[in-house]
Image (tube, rainbow, N blue to C red):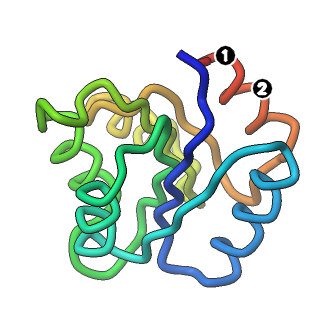
């Protein structure tokens, strides 16, 4: 499946701007969400081809949100890449257990992120 539409979920406006800019420069259409409510609203409007998910957010965290999305039959096929400052191996393992397809730590390396997206597509 070709990945064109990416939903970036992060509560940091700086991160959202950085990721949006990076993805758009690489030809992706980007939508953003800052929390769980925003995320479900975006999902109801348009199904993305990929979700980049932060972990540390107010309200539902990225692990909980990833689990909720991957268990929803409408979105179970949308790959999620955790994109977080939580860099412990236990965090990575937990993220993958919640249904994430991959895990990348911040600060995000643009080449590494593009390689991970390409590997999914």
Q: Quadrant of residue 99?
A: top left
**Is residue 9 shown left or right of residue 68?**
right
* x 66%, y 16%: residue: 119
* Depicted 85 relative to depicted 105: above or below: below
What is the number of callouts on the image?
2
Q: Could you say which is closer to the camera, residue 79 or residue 63?
A: 79
- Residue extending furthest front? 45
Mark 1: give few (<14), some (14-19) or many (20+) Cα within 10 Å: few
* Residue hosting label 2: 115
* x 62%, y 37%: residue: 4
* x 80%, y 64%: residue: 21
Q: Quadrant of residue 19?
A: bottom right
Q: Could you say which is closer to the camera, residue 103 or residue 51?
A: 51
* Depicted 119 relative to depicted 106: above or below: above
In which quadrant is the C terminus drawn? top right
Asked if labels 1 and 2 touch by Cβ distance under 8 angstroms, the answer is yes
Q: Could you say which is closer to the camera, residue 17 or residue 31?
A: 31
* x 30%, y 55%: residue: 43
**Is residue 91 shown left or right of residue 86?**
left
What number is the disc on residue 17?
none
* Residue hosting label 1: 119
| Secondary-structure class at tag 2 | helix
Residue 111: image location, x then y, percent: 87, 37
The answer for how far apart the CA atoms under marks 2 and 1 are is 6 Å
């Amino acid at each position: 499946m070709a990945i064109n539409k990416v939903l970036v979920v992060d509560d940091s406006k700086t991160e959202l701007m950085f990721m949006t800019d990076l993805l758009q420069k690489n030809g992706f259409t980007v939508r953003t969400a800052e929390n769980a409510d925003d995320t479900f609203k975006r999902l109801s409007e348009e199904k993305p081809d990929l979700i980049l998910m932060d972990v540390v957010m107010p309200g539902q965290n990225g692990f909980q949100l990833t689990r909720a999305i991957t268990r929803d039959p409408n979105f179970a096929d949308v790959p999620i890449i955790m994109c977080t400052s939580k860099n412990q191996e236990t965090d990575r393992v937990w993220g993958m257990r919640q249904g994430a397809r991959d895990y990348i730590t911040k600060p995000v390396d643009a080449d590494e992120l593009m390689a991970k997206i390409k590997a999914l597509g």
